[in-house]
Amino acid sequence: AVVGVSVNARSPDVDLSGRAPPTMLVLSPQLGPGEGKEHSRIAGADDTEVEFDGVTYSVTKVDFTSHPVISEYVAKNNDTAMLPDLIQLFWNRNLTDGDIGNPSSEGYVVLSMAHRDYLQGNIDACYTVVMALDGTIVQAQVAPTQEVDGVTYFTRFEGLKMKDSTTVLLAQNTDVEGDEFYTWDLSGDALESSSTANVEPLPIWDATDNATGSSHDIQYVSTEEVGVDGYLVINNNLDKLFLYNSNGTVKWEYTPSYINDVDGEIHFNHAQIAYDKDGELSVFVSVRDMSCIAKLNFTSGAELWKLGGLYSDFNVTDLDGHRYVVGDGHGAFTHQHNAEYIGDGKFALFDNGYNGSLPAVRDSRMVIMDVDEVNREATITWEWQTGVHALIFGDADPLPTGNMVGTFWPATVHPNSSDIRESFEASAVEVTHTGSTAWMLGVKGTGMSADSAYDRYDQEAPVGWAFYSIERFYTSLLIKGATMDTSSGMVSFSVYNTYRQQFDLSATAVITCGEHTRTQPITIAPHWQETTVSQAFEDMGSSCEVSVSTQTNSASTRITRS
């Protein structure tokens, strides 16, 4: 007989970092033997294996032209096609496996990389790629071009999000009209390593629709979730939000009450519709130039609070214990990017540590922050310092393992630095909750000095190669820690979706032990929070089969009695 099923999301008193909130500043990870940035050697272009801090990493040269879309483009435009001098990938699979195992390292990353002066807009290359963690390029696109004063420039993509488990949303940086937001369908065999299919991104809206917005962000929502099937975007002036339906009609909009009152720009750079800890449908907005996160009520459109900056409603305690109190004119994070609610009262963000001039306030860092809305207290519980100043851009997203994935770039490149983080023009990185680098993609400049340090920014914008954000996804659900406890008769496991969805996801769990099978509806928590499932059996037999399925994806595993 089968008795009882329980499903629980991550316990609210468990920190996402997997450890008690630290009381001392977490040091930047050491990417080589020694202390600080005094390492014994740098990674050579022809290395296949290196050791940093006693951890061995495989080193791979990543070749974008290994994919036919890019190789054909380069062949046709040999005189003008721009490529980095070198792309290196550092990987320790044990660290990306984490507590999930091999399936955690079998996912993909999506990145869009552009080149030249971002402030002036004279972009001369932009490649968007889907890549396995070993560096295999499985899909790629060369961005569209535009004519400016008779000169052809590439557009670039900043907004990059998963719509579902096989569709990437792309927002193009130019004078954005309705035909410059895209969906990139990666279903079917598009991700097979042997596939040569040229999967073109398709416009969400056509020229007859009225949808406009900026490239900074885009989120898909469904009728089931918010009553509208459409897309949340930020306007071109970066001070309003619009939710368009699939026909380009505005179904919801937000203009801040302070739009004409603040000193300087507002600069929304991330917007997100999600349910808060209390189940209220909310909108969370990263307001870069005010160094704050704002929370809105979706139904009324009213602003509920600001966190950070001059107008903060919260006291914020940093990781080193320093407390920034309301009204003191300073904040724990500045000019942040991709600040996002990740469930259970927590936020992840990339703290640029920049306040409009150099020297910067601090090294840029990835951050997790715990927010107590009732008492108006926020506490930074985890950080990973990049070791560089990334004046704009940057990402920080949690993964099912508890690792964090993000992007950054240094304002000054030191090509021969023994700290590899400042030796590349652009970097994407996955780090563990204890601060170890698990995976890193580094992009060298094109035709730049291999010996001398060089500045590569125009005001605050990068010059050369840079990423804006990164996404990870999988083609199967992830099952973690499946166990059968013969003393209690309990089968337990955790499950995660294939991508970091923003709302609850309905699924079905089927557990078979011996001759007994139980089918049970479950709900997979959003934001890649852990969802645990437990099932009691009176007779477990010698093994159990666990499977979980949604409308589009599934996963299964077998447990054998030890």
Image (cartoon, rainbow, N blue to C red):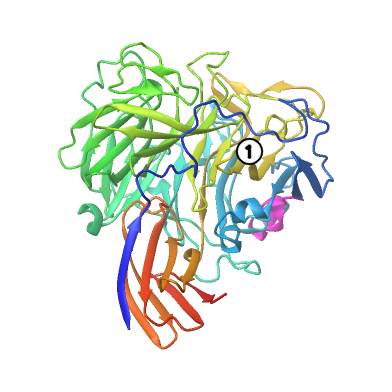
> Could you tell me which residue is drawn at 31 percent across and 65 percent down?
6
Instruction: Give the residue at the far left of this rendering.
Output: 300
Locate residue 30, reporting x and y percent.
Answer: 69, 33
Left or right: where does residue 430 sit relative to residue 277? right
Crowding near pointer 1: few (<14 within 10 Å), some, many (20+)? many
> Could you tell me which residue is drawn at 72 percent across and 50 percent down?
62
Q: Pick the residue in front: 44 or 522.
A: 522
Examine the rendered structure and indicate whether residue 253 appears above or below residue 482.
Answer: above
* Residue behind mark 1: 427
Instruction: Give the residue at the far bottom of this rendering.
Output: 515
Give yes or no for residue 477 being in the magenta stretch. no
Give yes or no for residue 66 being in the magenta stretch. yes
Q: Which residues are magenta?
A: 60-74
Residue 175 visible in the shown view: no
Locate residue 425, reporting x and y percent.
Answer: 67, 33
Examine the rendered structure and indicate whether residue 362 appears above or below residue 303.
Answer: above
Examine the rendered structure and indicate whether residue 122 appears above or below residue 200.
Answer: above
Left or right: where does residue 18 sit relative to residue 31? left
Locate residue 470, reporting x and y percent.
Answer: 53, 45
Q: Pick the residue in front: 37 or 296.
A: 37
> Could you tell me which residue is drawn at 76 percent across and 28 percent down?
417
Locate residue 382, reporting x and y percent.
Answer: 49, 34
- The quadrant holding residue 71 is bottom right
SS at mark 1? strand
Residue 333 visible in the shown view: yes
